[in-house]
Amino acid sequence: MKRVDDFRLRFGKQELVPIVIGGMGVDISTADLALEAARLGGIGHISDAMLPTVSDRRYDTNYVSQKLKKYKANVASSDKRDVHFNLAELEEATRQHVSRAMEAKRGEGMIFINCMEKLTMNAPRETLRVRLTAALDAGIDGITLAAGLHLGSFALIEDHPRFRDAKLGIIVSSARALGMFLRKNARLDRAPDYVVVEGPLAGGHLGFGLDWAKYDLAAIVADVMAMLKAEHLDIPVIAAGGIFTGSDAAAFLEHGAAAVQVATRFTVTRECGLPDKVKQEYFKASETDIEVNSLSPTGYPMRMLKASPGIGSGIRPNCEAYGYLLDANGRCAYIDAYNLEVERHPGAKKISVQDKTCLCTHMRNFDIWTCGHYTYRLKDTSCRAEDGSYQLLSAEHVFRDYQFSTGGQIALPA
Ligand SMILES: Cc1cc2nc3c(=O)[nH]c(=O)nc-3n(C[C@H](O)[C@H](O)[C@H](O)COP(=O)(O)O)c2cc1C
């Protein structure tokens, strides 16, 4: 019986353990978590979601208060068109986060950054260009393009000196999306170095509709591999979403995937950025505690725990401080949903917004508990203390369990 360690992910001459820890914003996949994956010979992701506020929390900067101060007069207005990011600060925050992680890197593995197109930041092209460029400047090993079709993203960095040497990949949920990306970028003569195929059981935003349950990761991976073969493209395919044990992972590798990308099992590790209290919620969850809903203003369905405190909260939109989801015209679906509720309840001190959530604020505060489908199995991966709490795991323990386990087994912590 094969195990993950029988396989290697190859990038040219470099060989890696074929385990990728997926990006989890906002700072859920911390640099500490990514560093462990790299130390153990795999790939870890940091996330570039909301880095100015992450930087304030971690490195004592004050980007958020400065931005809020600048746009304070706009807070009560529903028109957010004039609320912009300072691109120099965005660059600084990205460089700082990436370079600190890269300087701390040990071992043979790599650190990539997850970059979501849906973070449109009221100037989609300009802000994305700054984020991608700053990450390359700061020495990131690779960039995983996520949450969007990214048809124009390669072109934003085509003149960067590292455009052809850094590893660049994209997350897709269908062969069709990958086909669009490849066609659009054909003129650049620079294929992606890897493709992550993310199925419907993943955490975070889903590249499917609310009919996600009809889709199957193995079938999509096979589709994508067939398409690449037909196009004579030799691009490693990385399977993601619902791969819970080493044996699940080995099965994908045996069927031709070059690696697996996993995340949920790492949400209950000490290195994960979620507060410990929230990690316990993940451990305790049962299958019926998890839902896929349309609360995200991005328009993509998102999977989360139903008990997330951010659900139903009617806080005033916080775009002057954050504003990461403002589209090219300064709009966000949460602002519209909020204004409608305000109109419906004139004079009310507190309102509740049920159909959308202020994702920037609630993700920043760890109040939307996004999670993978198999979060309800996390309780089987640890031990329970007498007070009912579960023992947090080390990232090394989970990584090694993926790497070496067989027969569907999950190693419990010592
Ligand atoms: C808590 C959490 C947050 C996530 N956030 C992101 C994200 O910010 N960007 C992204 O591309 N994928 C995100 N994902 C998806 C993961 O990177 C990964 O591809 C997927 O969850 C793998 O499936 P698994 O969780 O079943 O192992 C997130 C997943 C989880 C569990």
Image: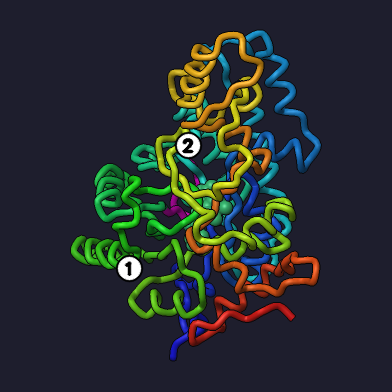
Q: Is residue 367 left or right of residue 136?
A: right
Q: Nearer the viewer, mark 1 or mark 2?
A: 2
Q: Which residue is mark 1?
A: 218
Residue 164 located within the stretch drawn in magenta? yes
Closest to the observer: 8 or 28?
28
Closest to the observer: 346 or 371?
346
Tell me the residue at 59%/61% (across/down): 44
Res 227 quadrant in image: bottom left
Tell me the residue at 74%/69% (across/down): 391
Mainly helix, strand or loop, the magenta region? loop
Looking at the rendered structure, the kind of residue marked 1 is Ala
Q: Is residue 409 above or below residue 287?
A: below
Q: Secondary structure at mark 2?
A: loop
Tell me the residue at 44%/91% (across/down): 1
Q: Position of residue 321 (x, y in %)?
A: 66, 24
Residue 18 located within the stretch drawn in magenta? no
Q: How is the image coloured?
A: rainbow
Q: Is residue 160 left or right of residue 104?
A: left
Q: Of marks 1 and 2, which one's residue comes earlier in the chain?
A: 1
Q: Residue furthest left?
A: 230
One can see residue 193 in this view: no
Closest to the observer: 185 or 321?
321
* Within-10-Å neighbours for mark 2: few <14, some 14–19, many 20+: many
Q: Which residue is mark 2?
A: 295
Q: Which residues, given as a range, are shown in magenta?
A: 160-169
